[in-house]
Amino acid sequence: MSEVTIITFANQKGGVGKTTLCTMFANYLVAKGKRTIVIDCDGQQTIFEKRKADHKKYKDLKEPYKVQAFSIADPENVRNLMQNLRQMKGTVLIDAPGNLAQQGLIPLFVQSDYVVCPYQYETTSINSTVTFLGFILQLKKRVQSMATEILFVVNRHDKRYGTERERKLWAETDAQWANYGKVMPKIEQRVEMQRYNTVELTVSQEEIVTPCFDSIYNVIYGENGHGKAKE
């Protein structure tokens, strides 16, 4: 049995905060004492660049976890990467690109234990999430051994907005997602989330993300989770 848990943050829609959540979840896991590595597969390499910036900002920085940039342009290279990751121990977080046309995404998703899918309560984001979900479901049909579990996260949620009709539609959307995965607690839209780094969570950030991250943690490392008893 594999001793690594692979968690990929992905959606087709850009701007939903997957890179931010991937980085902050890495900070959260390290604070929990989990051995963690981040693989930045997004073309912009935001996490990788932010880690370099953090080295300049925090002198003598002791890295809480490794951040490695990786291109998924070649599917064979991705397959080799995922096979190598399966030989590791601990938790691997992957920040995936949003372009579903890239063939390298197939072995990446097939070998992921969990996909965290952030989205927002707006039409474009929901439609893109439907497309992304369809891609994953079709992949599962093609690859019978694929056991990837999807965790949906409403990100940048502003609870001040939404008519009664809109809120009803949002609730119905979440209910639909629950047929294909687990819906996690919402993460509020707060300016503090823009000030994230690759070192640690601030107190304010902890308050914002903890309800959601605790739920994700319990799914993955709880009694029935893939990451149970893994270090």
Image (cartoon, grey):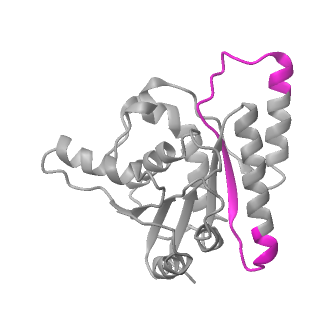
Q: Note whether residue 189 is visible.
A: yes
Which segment did they paint magenta?
139-168
> Residue 76's spot in the image, x, y percent?
53, 81
> Residue 138's spot in the image, x, y percent?
80, 66
> Residue 56's spot in the image, x, y percent?
18, 45
Q: Above or below — where is 21 with respect to 195?
A: below
On the rendered structure, is 107 left or right of 143?
left
Asked whether 163 or 218 is in front, the reply is 163
Image quadrant in which you'd find residue 109? bottom right
Q: Above or below — where is 100 with respect to 75?
A: above
> Residue 21's spot in the image, x, y percent?
50, 45
Image quadrant in which you'd find residue 189? top right
Is 159 part of what is drawn in magenta? yes
Q: Above or below — where is 188 with respect to 129?
A: above
Locate the C terminus by quadrant. Answer: bottom left
On the rendered structure, is 82 left or right of 175?
left
On the rendered structure, is 70 left or right of 180?
left
Please report the residue visible at 61 percent of the width from the left and 65 percent of the height from the top.
102
Please report the residue visible at 40 percent of the width from the left and 63 percent of the height from the top.
37
- Report how many numbered discs are placed on residues in the image: 0
Please report the residue visible at 67 percent of the width from the left and 52 percent of the height from the top.
151
Q: Note whether residue 31 is visible.
A: no
Asked whether 188 or 130 is in front, the reply is 130
Please report the residue visible at 80 percent of the width from the left and 16 percent of the height from the top.
163
Locate the N terminus by quadrant. Answer: bottom right
Is 82 part of what is drawn in magenta? no
